[in-house]
Amino acid sequence: MKIVNENEFENEVKEGYTLVDFFANWCGPCKMLGPVLEELSEERKDVKFIKVDCDESDGLAMKFGVMTIPALFLLKNGEVVAKTGGYQPKNGIEKFINDNMK
């Protein structure tokens, strides 16, 4: 999974579905979620997975109204279609993606 900064973000999310993981290196639940998202990113070719470090890209975190981390946003062609937060098991994230892809 690629970590993107504010300069790269728009280009990364402009086409198709993208799951954005807002995280921080010091966040325990974020560390637990990382391997789950990595596994999903290898299995799902219909969704791009990217990560945004809230400490390094705080402007993006503010733009998206991220108040708690981890925060997951599903975007379609750059527009937010759904969001969820906190650690979730793999099947919970799969359900989140599947329920919100139209």
Image (spheres, rainbow, N blue to C red):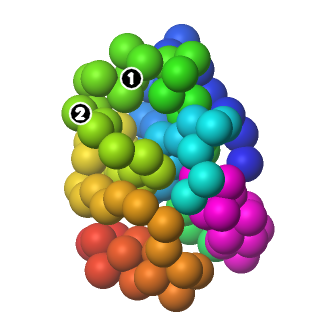
Q: Upstream in the sequence, badge 2 or badge 1?
A: 1
Please tell me in which quadrant of the rendered image residue 38 appears.
Answer: bottom right
100, above or below 81, in the image: below
Magenta-colored span: 30-43
* Residue 46 at x, y percent in the picture: 56, 67
* Residue 8 in view here: no
Amino acid at circle 2: Gly
Q: Residue at x 67, y 70 (%)?
A: 36
71, above or below 89, in the image: above
Q: Are marks 2 and 1 in contact (CB under 8 Å)?
A: no
Q: Residue at x 26, y 47 (%)?
A: 80
63, above or below 47, in the image: above
Q: Nearer the viewer, residue 28 or 60?
A: 28
* Residue 32 at x, y percent in the picture: 66, 63
Q: Residue at x 27, y 24 (%)?
A: 63
- How many marks the image carries: the answer is 2
Q: Which residue is mark 2?
A: 65
Is residue 34 left or right of 68 when viewed as pictured? Answer: right
Tell me, yes or no, whether the highlighted magenta stretch contains residue 41: yes
Quadrant in the picture for the C terminus: bottom left
Q: Nearer the viewer, residue 19 or 33?
A: 33
Residue 60, numbered label: 1
Amino acid at circle 1: Leu
Q: Residue at x 45, y 25 (%)?
A: 10
Please tell me in which quadrant of the rendered image residue 4 appears.
Answer: top right
Q: Secondary structure at mark 1?
A: helix
Tell me, yes or no, whether the highlighted magenta stretch contains residue 9: no
